[in-house]
Image: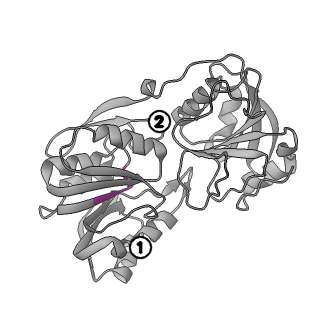
Amino acid sequence: MGKLYLKPNNLSALIERFDLFSEHSSFLCVNPPAGTVLPEHCAAWSIYAHHDHPRGELDQLSATLELAKNSTNKPEAVVVFLTKEKALLLFLFAQLAATLEVGTPIYLVGENDAGIKSWVKKAIPQFAPFVKLTSGNHCQLLSTSLEAPATFSIEDYLTRETLVCPEGDIESQFLPGVFGHGRLDKGTELLLAHMPASVRGDILDFGCGSGVISHWLSRHRQPRSLTAVDISTLAKIATERSLAELTVPHKVVLSDGLQQVTGSYDWLITNPPFHQGKQHNYEMTRRFIVEAKGYLKPRGRLLMVANSFLPWPEFLKEHFRNTEVLVETRQYRVTLSSV
């Protein structure tokens, strides 16, 4: 049947040792990590647009699982890679319950420090209790099966929240797993409170989440256009909903970093992510900084807020003509860089 190839880590060691993919003739892999290469009899449903995830003919990149209810091509089994957010995992399982045949076996795999142990004792509606199959390398593999079908509507998972922001509240919409769900992140709050008055023109909002920064800019600065970018299909939908009533020309782009971004901008503004699950992951922001100058107009600027312990000011100075710290607290730092 072939093997699952992952970047070497504890999770891949457990999966390959158990030889799970020899048990069924077809699999759906849900939310596979970046860099995963699947056996030929597996399809992937990815909610993140990782640029290094190969895509086969049956693979999907979407917030919702697009498998016809009466399809004859349904997988024999499903492997779900654990998400750190409980609400996001329940969102994924709800879609499986609305799509799969009753009795379909489902495997949940994850690392101990990401919370996999707690799921042995938890129940998910429509599914049998989890059973632990194996463990090792600080990971566990659990199994369950679909006991009863359900219906699914993404509208049931969209929430509308009023966020208290500098200079006035902003209404945003969220889906499970979208950054800052239901609250204004403290870093974003600091960034908005110290937003330069000169921000105008064509603006790119990198790592947009639910679109809070873009929405705020449309009200309190002078954008000619707004482009919001995120790696998450869920964030893309949430931002499109949040910005739906803006009169400022805007678009939302699904992209790992700047891969799918075109055009040039007067301002790049970001509160960049640096977590991947429980682990710190600086590569996306590092790559963004290196590539950012290629997307800025002459005299363009990059405005960024990040945790104060992160080494971005020094890195920015290596790639920009000038970098200054606008404000710094115990937790966060706002920097302004110019080409």
Find residue 310 and name its label.
Answer: none
Q: Nearer the viewer, residue 65 or 33?
A: 65
Please give the residue where the numbered disc 1 appears in the rendered image.
291
Left or right of 171, for residue 42: right
Prevalent SS, magenta region: strand
Residue 125, percent from left and from top: 62, 19
Between the C-alphas of marks 2 and 1, the distance is: 30 Å
Left or right of 109, for residue 311: left
Q: Amino acid at mark 1?
A: Glu
Q: Is residue 182 visible?
A: no
At mark 2, the secondary structure is loop
Find residue 176 and name its label.
Answer: 2
Which of the 4 image quadrants contains residue 42?
top right
Q: Residues within 10 Å of mark 1 (few under 14, many from 20)?
A: some
Q: Is residue 243 visible?
A: yes
Q: Amino acid at mark 2?
A: Pro
Magenta segment: does it hold 50? no
Q: Residue at x 58, y 33 (%)?
A: 92
> Closer to the N terminus: mark 2 or mark 1?
2
Q: Which span of residues is magenta-colored?
A: 204-208
Q: Nearer the viewer, residue 194 or 98?
A: 98
Residue 141, percent from left and from top: 76, 40
